[in-house]
């Protein structure tokens, strides 16, 4: 029996040594995986920050262009308004009676529309 007992002890000792080596290798693999994952997370975080910064800069650029376009449109509308006022002033100077009649008719129509609602 001592041979069998010694063989069992030897086998168990060898199995324990293998288990210890497996645990050590597993711990090393986990540490390496954690280090690689940490590096990947840092790289991903840096990429996200860069993309967000680029997006913010693009948004600011678009806002500047939008402001310039709105300014151009406002200027064009002001020019058209001035042209319309100039045309109306010229028409009044050329045909004052027609202009007075048109204004009188417009006023009369507006007053009639105002009274019909009551």
Image (cartoon, rainbow, N blue to C red):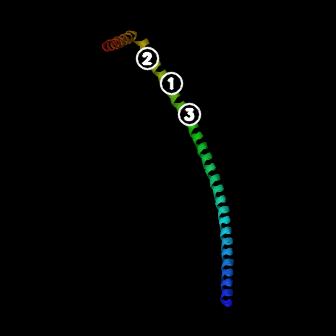
Q: Residue 47 at x, y = what percent?
A: 62, 53
Q: Tag 2's secondary structure? A: helix
User: Which of marks 3 and 1 precedes in the sequence?
Assistant: 3
Q: Work out how far the residue at label 1 is from the one at label 3, CA to CA, in angstroms.
A: 16 Å
Q: Tag 3's secondary structure? A: helix
- 97 is higher (above) or lower (below) than 34: above
Q: Quadrant of the N terminus?
A: bottom right
For image coordinates 36% across by 12% down, the residue present is 107
Q: Quadrant of the C terminus?
A: top left
User: Which of marks 2 and 1 precedes in the sequence?
Assistant: 1
Can you tell which of label 1 and label 2 is closer to the viewer? 1
User: Residue at the left extreme?
Assistant: 116
Check disc 1: other Cα within 10 Å, few if <14, some if 14-19, many if 20+. Answer: few
Which quadrant of the figure has residue 96?
A: top left
Which quadrant of the figure has residue 11?
A: bottom right
Task: Give the residue at mark 1.
Answer: 78
Depth check: 115 or 10 in front? Answer: 10
Task: Give the residue at mark 2.
Answer: 88
Task: Give the residue at mark 3.
Answer: 67
Depth check: 94 or 47 in front? Answer: 47
Check disc 2: other Cα within 10 Å, few if <14, some if 14-19, many if 20+. Answer: few
């Amino acid at each position: 029996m001592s041979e069998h007992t010694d063989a069992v002890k030897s086998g168990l000792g060898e199995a324990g040594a293998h288990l210890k080596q497996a645990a050590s290798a597993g711990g090393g693999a986990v540490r390496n995986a954690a280090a690689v994952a940490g590096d990947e997370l840092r790289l991903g975080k840096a990429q996200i920050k860069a993309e967000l910064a680029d997006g913010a800069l693009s948004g600011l650029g678009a806002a500047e262009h939008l402001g310039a376009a709105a300014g151009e449109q406002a200027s064009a509308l002001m020019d058209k308004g001035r042209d319309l006022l100039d045309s109306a002033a010229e028409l009044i100077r050329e045909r004052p009676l027609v202009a007075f009649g048109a204004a009188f008719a417009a006023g009369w129509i507006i007053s009639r529309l105002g009274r019909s609602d009551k």
